[in-house]
Image (spheres, rainbow, N blue to C red):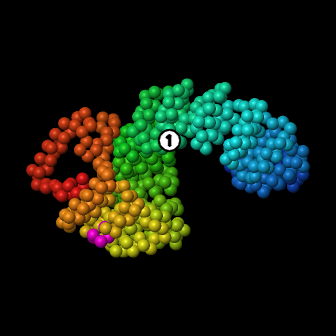
């Protein structure tokens, strides 16, 4: 555009077509402020715009929220005699309905002598954006012509409000449904958490594209069905008619991270590199997260260092991963590299940094980083940051300081913070703080028996068996049972769940036989299990 502007400036008497060419060039390349500046220059030489000029200028005003300049352009539209032009009118409607008063948009709509389907669509979309679905539907019913775009926008309006019954009725009434229509409904069901309806609609679809598969896979992910994410991803690959894109791969990798499906995650990594996604920022970030959560922090570091382009998410993910795996020194070192690279940290960055300090027992350094959030980066600490500081103090055995820190917090401590304190109390056998923490936890989570079990374990460690018995009675009186421990393991290209004392697996006898054999080997090597812990933890 700099070269184009040089040539343009050398033209002694540019006409409106040349100005329009410059307007389009600036707009296409995202230089919307320059469009407005050049338009003022055009007015200064008394060159009259045409019907192609105003829409570009008005859309540029919309892009940078320049409503005052847009209103000035509107005045010029009236003076130039383009008030009734449908292209100019549509641009005005879009500008007013998106950023300004909706009444002005409707006034422009009413002044248009000829309204094409685009004008009707813009006005209806304006009402939808403002949350007035009733007025949007009223205009939709009055529209003399409805194309597929207008139908899809109206259906989307109902979906945005969560009114899936109305959306479905309108969807069934569409004369010609394209794949985008089906995708709109699919995403709607996924967003409201109706996975069964989402699956049924997916099966009904006469045609599917990448967005269709992503709608189903993303719906599973948003609703915590991570095993189903991987199942649908595999089905998509076997089907072979539609290839996954970067969004599909990111969702699949996220599911691998949540389930610990490392082998499949490695396969997705290889697939991504062989299909042109090696330098993709989003896939790279997802790979870092997957490897870190699956325990291969070296692989996560390798992916991070191989990325030509890194964003804040890249740095946050690797720093958090290092901290999570006990590589606190490496996390803090990488934080220094991050600052040297000119990347400004955010609140998530400091959660990783404070966790690293917690694992290393760096109390003073933790305080320093915590204070620098506000002083150096103007980041207001959230409850997660306060929780990290409490965990840091508690892990270091400074339980009285931790309790004092909780009392001075600007917000009320949540269950996570009190649970961290209760856990530290067992390590340092501090019964007074433990009983206080349990009392607060009961207020937050009255139906969580795990909190009673934790205190019961502390009583057991101290040999206070009467208190252990008292807590067992308290747990029994609640009528609740502690959820059994659950583990996930990747076996034969699938993820299997195992619960404590689980007997549902078809190879239960073989599994427990192997466990007994391992126990004998451990005992023969001198291992003596702490049976008290097992008794108290049940």
Residue 370 appears in the rendering: yes
Q: Residue furthest left?
A: 524
Position of 66 compared to 156: left or right? right
* Crowding near the residue tagged with mark 1, few <14, some 14–19, many ≥20 C-alpha atoms within 10 Å: some
Residue 142, image quadrant: top right
Q: Is the residue 71 above or below the residue 239 in the image?
A: below
Q: Residue at x 34, y 74 (%)?
A: 400
How many circles with numbers are drawn on the protein? 1
**Residue 513 locus on image (x, y percent):** 16, 39
Read off the magenta span: 430-434
Q: Is the residue 138 above or below the residue 310 in the image?
A: above
The stretch drawn in magenta includes residue 494: no
Residue 111, image quadrant: top right
Front position in the image: 435 or 72: 435
Front position in the image: 342 or 536: 536
Q: Residue at x 50, y 47 (%)?
A: 281
**Residue 359 locus on image (x, y percent):** 34, 64
Front position in the image: 254 or 129: 129
Position of 56 compared to 522: left or right? right
**Residue 506 locus on image (x, y percent):** 25, 33
Position of 328 compared to 182: left or right? left
Q: Residue at x 25, y 42 (%)?
A: 502
Q: Residue at x 71, y 45 (%)?
A: 127
Q: Give the prevailing secondary structure in the magenta stretch.
A: helix
Residue 361 appears in the rendering: no
Q: Secondary structure at mark 1?
A: loop
**Residue 121 locus on image (x, y percent):** 73, 38
Q: Which residue is mark 1?
A: 193
């Amino acid at each position: 555009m700099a070269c184009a502007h040089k040539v343009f400036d050398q033209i002694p008497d540019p006409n409106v077509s040349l100005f329009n060419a410059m307007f389009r060039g600036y707009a296409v390349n995202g230089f919307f402020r320059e469009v407005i500046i050049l338009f003022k220059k055009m007015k200064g030489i008394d060159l009259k715009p045409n019907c192609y000029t105003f829409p570009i200028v008005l859309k540029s005003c919309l892009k940078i929220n320049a409503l005052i300049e847009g209103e000035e352009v509107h005045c010029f539209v009236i003076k130039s005699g383009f008030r009734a032009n449908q292209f100019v009118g549509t641009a005005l409607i879009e500008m007013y309905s998106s950023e300004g008063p909706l009444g002005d948009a409707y006034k422009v709509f009413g002044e248009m002598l000829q309204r094409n389907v685009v004008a009707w669509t813009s006005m209806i979309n304006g009402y939808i954006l403002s949350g007035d679905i009733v007025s949007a539907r009223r205009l939709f019913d009055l529209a003399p012509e409805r194309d597929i775009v207008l139908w899809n926008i109206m259906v989307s309006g109902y979906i945005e409000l969560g009114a899936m019954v109305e959306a479905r009725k309108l969807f069934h009434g569409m004369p010609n449904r394209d794949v985008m229509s089906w995708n709109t409904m699919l995403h709607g069901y996924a967003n409201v958490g109706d996975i069964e309806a989402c699956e049924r609609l997916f099966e009904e679809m006469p045609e599917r594209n990448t967005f269709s598969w992503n709608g189903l896979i993303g719906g599973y992910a948003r609703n915590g069905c991570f095993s189903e994410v991987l199942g649908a991803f595999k089905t998509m690959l076997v089907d072979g008619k539609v290839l996954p894109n970067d969004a599909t791969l990111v969702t699949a990798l996220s599911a691998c991270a949540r389930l610990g499906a490392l082998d499949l995650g490695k396969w997705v990594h290889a697939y991504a590199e062989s299909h042109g996604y090696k330098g993709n920022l989003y896939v790279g970030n997802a790979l870092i997260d997957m490897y870190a959560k699956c325990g291969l922090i070296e692989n996560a570091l390798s992916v991070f260092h191989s990325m030509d382009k890194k964003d804040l998410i890249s740095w946050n993910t690797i720093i958090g991963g290092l901290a999570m795996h006990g590589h606190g020194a490496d996390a803090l070192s990488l934080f220094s590299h991050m600052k040297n690279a000119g990347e400004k940290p955010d609140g998530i960055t400091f959660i990783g940094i404070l966790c690293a300090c917690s694992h290393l027992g760096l109390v003073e350094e933790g305080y320093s980083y915590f204070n620098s959030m506000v002083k150096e980066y103007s980041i207001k600490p959230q409850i997660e940051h306060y929780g990290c500081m409490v965990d840091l103090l508690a892990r270091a055995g400074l339980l009285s300081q931790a309790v004092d820190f909780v009392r001075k917090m600007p917000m009320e401590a949540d269950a996570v913070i009190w649970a961290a304190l209760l856990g530290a109390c067992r390590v340092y056998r501090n019964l007074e703080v433990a009983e206080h923490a349990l009392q607060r936890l009961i207020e937050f989570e009255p139906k969580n028996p795990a909190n009673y079990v934790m205190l019961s374990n502390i009583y057991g460690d101290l040999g206070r068996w009467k208190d252990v018995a008292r807590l067992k009675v308290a747990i029994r009186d609640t009528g609740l049972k502690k959820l059994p421990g659950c583990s996930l393991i990747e076996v034969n290209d699938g993820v299997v769940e195992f619960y404590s004392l689980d007997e549902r697996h078809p190879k239960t006898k073989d599994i427990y036989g192997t466990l007994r054999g391992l126990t004998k080997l451990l005992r023969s090597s001198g291992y003596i299990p702490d049976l008290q812990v097992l008794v108290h933890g049940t």
